[in-house]
Amino acid sequence: MPDFLNSIIAEVLGPFFLLMVMLLITLLVDFFLPAFQKWTRFVLLLLVLLLLMEPATESFRQIQLITHSIASLFLGMYPLIAAMILASGATFSVVNFQPAMLLFAQGAVVFAEKFLLPILSTALLLDILTRLMPEIVFTRMADLLRTSLLAIVSAMVAAYSIFITAGGALTWTLSGTLNEPIKELIRQNIPLIGSLLTDTLGSIGRYSSGATAYISIWLLLSIWTVALLPALKILCTAFLFRWTAALIEPFSQKEVCGLLDDIGRTLFVLCAISFLISFAFIYTTIFIVTFIKMMTLGK
Amino acid sequence: MAVIFQLFIVYILLLLLSFAAPALHPILYTTLFLLTAVYVLFTFLVPFATSVLSLVEKVPVPYTTLLVVSAGLYYMGELLALQMKDEGYGAFARLFQTVMKIVILTLWFPSIKQLIETIHALIPW
């Protein structure tokens, strides 16, 4: 078990430590060969991209894979669910689910796959281009893309909350006073997406706490874990980027820590998108579990 | 420490030679420069570079070696080009510098290729 943990930590932290060692060596080289500075700047950017693009693109690939599989799952499942709803008749009215909400959740996933993720990777590429060629600046464009993506995602989360409160059957049962400090903590400490995160978590919690009447808490917990694990992993990676940028700022070139900061910011937005997807996943899973339970109980 | 004195003595010798035999000065300068450069290179720069590399020998990626080797190549190229410029062959020196740049870039080509592949994987189309 410790070996396993060690390998995970090495895999995640290794590139960042390597980058610091490389920064040290480049500082040494710069000291001996001031004329070589143009080269070291280029080489350092190359190294940052080589070492750290791998975790970032890995996160992108993971989210792309998950969105793609959830979207295709939905396409395969939809006729089946429609048939089930038709067959169940009276049972369905007990659950008080809205088919439109399911459509909305899955539509959000398809939207994320076809529209949000490509835009986000465009923002990342624009950032990299800006740092590689400081004469041609795309910073504002990348920022614009990121902020508009965040706006779209928050609008979707707001729409979710409206759907859920309109559903009526699902109510927030956990005590609000207990959650307030945690919410405040998240909101204050996670840059860019903190308030979005608490909103999303609140919506999911409101929704799934309504479902506890039908399914056991352990199943609910496992669904939550499965759905939120990728998002949490991306959040940790994004924080690692920000921390490394903060750590190397005093002794590295401006471009290097700026690039790290930009990648971190992009990963935060990716995390927000992945929350959207996890929410769709949680919604669909709980819907199906509850539905099957009701069907089998009803017969 | 001794090398500093040796270098200075070579410098004074060259100054003397430029008085004694002005016609022979370019060839003597070049020869002495090459001899001294090779001597300093192998007694100082190469051991220093190896000890710097041994600091980071546990690092599993080849980038440190690449960086130090390319810095050394750059330094050598600049040094020789400067010598050529001293003799008045500026164009030749420029040619030499360009070739050295291409050699250094060639060392980095596999890494650049890898980077392009990583970025390409990000683009979904």
Image (cartoon, coloured by chain):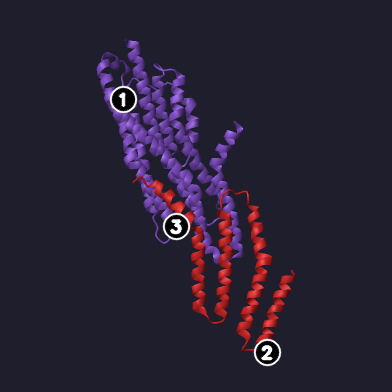
Give the CA distance from mark 3 to mark 2: 54 Å
Mark 1 or 2: the one toward you:
2
Residue A231 percent location from the top left of the image: 45, 35
Residue at mark 2: B20
**CB within 8 Å, label 3 to label 2:** no
Q: Nearer the viewer, residue A53 or A168?
A: A53
- A164 vs A131, nearest the viewer: A131
Q: Residue at x 58, y 56 (%)?
A: B65
Determine the CA span between mark 3 and mark 1: 50 Å
Going 50% across and 31% down the picture, which residue do you hit? Answer: A182
State whether discs 1 and 2 lie on one chain.
no
Q: Chain of mark 3?
A: A
Q: Around disc 1, counting alpha carbons within 10 Å, would you say few (fewer than 14), some (14 to 19), or many (20 or more)? A: few
- State the mark number for residue A166: 1
Residue type for callout 1: Ala
Q: Could you tell me which chain the residue with mark 1 belongs to?
A: A
Marked residue nearer the N-terminal end (3 or 1): 3
Tell me the amino acid under the disc marked 2: Ala
Q: Which mark is residue A221?
A: none
- Name the image quarter holding residue A250: bottom right
| Image position of A54 (left or right of A68) | right
Chain that the image shows in red = B
In the rendered image, which residue does mark 3 sit on? A132
Q: Amino acid at mark 3?
A: Leu
Please give the name of the residue rendered at 59% of the width and 51% of the height, measured from the top-left corner.
Answer: A21
